[in-house]
Image (cartoon, grey):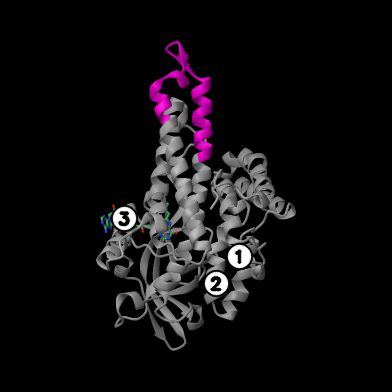
Amino acid sequence: MSFEVPEHVQPIRERVRQFIETEVIPLESVLDERGSQASNQAMQGLMAKAKQQGLWALGHPKEIGGQGLPFLDYVYINEVIGRSDLAMVALGTHSLQDSIMLNLHASPAWRDTYLKPLVEGEVFPSFAMTEPDVASSDPTQLRTHAELDGEDWIINGHKWFTSGADRAAYTTVMVRTEPDAPDHDAFSMIVVPTDTPGYNIVRDVRVMGFYGGHCEVKYENVRVPAENLLGPRGAGFKIAQERLGPGRIFHCMRWLGQAQRAFDLLCERANDRRAFGSALADKQQIQVMVFDSLAEIQASRMLTLAAAHKLDRGEQARVEIGLIKVVGAQMLHNVIDRAIQVHGAKGVTEDTPLRTARFARIYDGPDEVHRMTVARRVLREYQRGDGWDFGAR
Ligand SMILES: Cc1cc2nc3c(=O)[nH]c(=O)nc-3n(C[C@H](O)[C@H](O)[C@H](O)COP(=O)(O)OP(=O)(O)OC[C@H]3O[C@@H](n4cnc5c(N)ncnc54)[C@H](O)[C@@H]3O)c2cc1C
């Protein structure tokens, strides 16, 4: 297994990198004004350019209008997409998980309504699992529920952190539909168009000082047709799991791209800035920051690619994916934090792209939950008498 970018992926990866460097990064400050006319126009322009240059929806399957890059090739592309937070939308990557989920599980009517515009970037999706009133890292506790009334589902409940709900055409909401079933068979996913009466956005929750479209939403007698159900009744957990596996690999690769950009800035600043008679680069405390960042990025990259290769071979890689979620999120946080430190006051201004990555340790499951599930899985192997032989994994 090689950790280098395969030769056949290098040209397309380089074109994506160039696009991000020359087209996306120069517009970041405009694009950051989420929801403004200037920001929307700039994003529309980037999307059109990405399409013209053949860089749109590279990882989406061909049968739904994407370019069908194989999974492992696309893993390496995600590493460069991570260089800018905004590149996912500019390149049409943001809709990958939702469009695959619709394609596999939606009724023909909903597939016809949303799939093509979703892949084309004409409409945006959102996904609602988390609720403010229960610890949602244990989703068996979710309270939002739906009951069948004739041919319709009636949904009631309260969600928050539905990212992108401020501009989404629809939300896929996780709700309890089977009150008498065991918890893991009790939840379903239902598609709710955001203009349905009773779907009420309470607020865009300001997160660490910024509005990022992480909305709080109340569902008050929301009525949608029975056919809005994704997959069979009670399959919510199974569909959520399907969505998360490869998604976490792409996430972790993008974190590596984000960390690479922060590391570049850290090293450049250390070489350029002088204090107390020498460059920062000459100070041992700064060299430790360089060393620690290098080691953490390299370790995280190898773990992530090892997990990707395992998944590509058709294995589940649950332990490996749990590991990279925790190690990758901590790595990103540490590297960005050190890059901020080396920039002094400038590091916390809008004059650098260094933004906290603190969220990464919480979304898609907090560190503690991944540690718990990974440790339990490995301990079970010992209970069975198999142990965990690193040489055989
Ligand atoms: C930027 C951002 C975007 C998000 N986008 C979405 C989205 O689009 N859709 C969506 O549905 N959700 C989204 N989320 C929500 C996210 O998935 C949840 O915050 C996460 O699952 C944790 O749930 P919770 O916030 O209810 O925390 P809780 O479940 O209340 O957990 C709080 C803390 O308790 C501790 N804890 C929990 N379990 C254990 C354990 N077993 N052992 C030890 N400690 C434990 C952990 O420290 C954890 O951080 C987003 C979150 C963020 C920050």
**Residue 359 in sight from this viewpoint:** no
Reading the chain from its start, which is encountered first: label 3 or label 2?
2
Give the x, y percent position of residue 273: 50, 19
Residue placed farthest to the front in the image?
A: 391
Whether label 2 touches label 1, CB < 8 Å: yes
Name the residue tied to disc 1. 118
The kind of secondary structure the magenta stretch mainly shows is helix
Q: Amino acid at mark 2?
A: Leu
Q: Nearer the viewer, mark 3 or mark 2?
A: 3
Q: Give the label, 2 or 1, closer to the camera.
A: 2
Q: Is mark 1 within 8 Å of ligand 1?
A: no
| Segment colored magenta | 260-289
Magenta run includes residue 281: yes
**In the image, residue 244 lies at what x, y percent?**
45, 63
Seen in the picture, residue 302 relative to 129 is either above or below; the reply is above
Image-quarter location of ligand 1:
bottom left
State the image coordinates of residue 334 (x, y, percent, origin top left). 40, 38
* Secondary structure under the numbered disc 1 in the rendered image: helix
Q: Residue at x 31, y 55 (%)?
A: 371
Q: CA distance from mark 3 to mark 2?
A: 30 Å
Any part of residue 257 in sight: yes
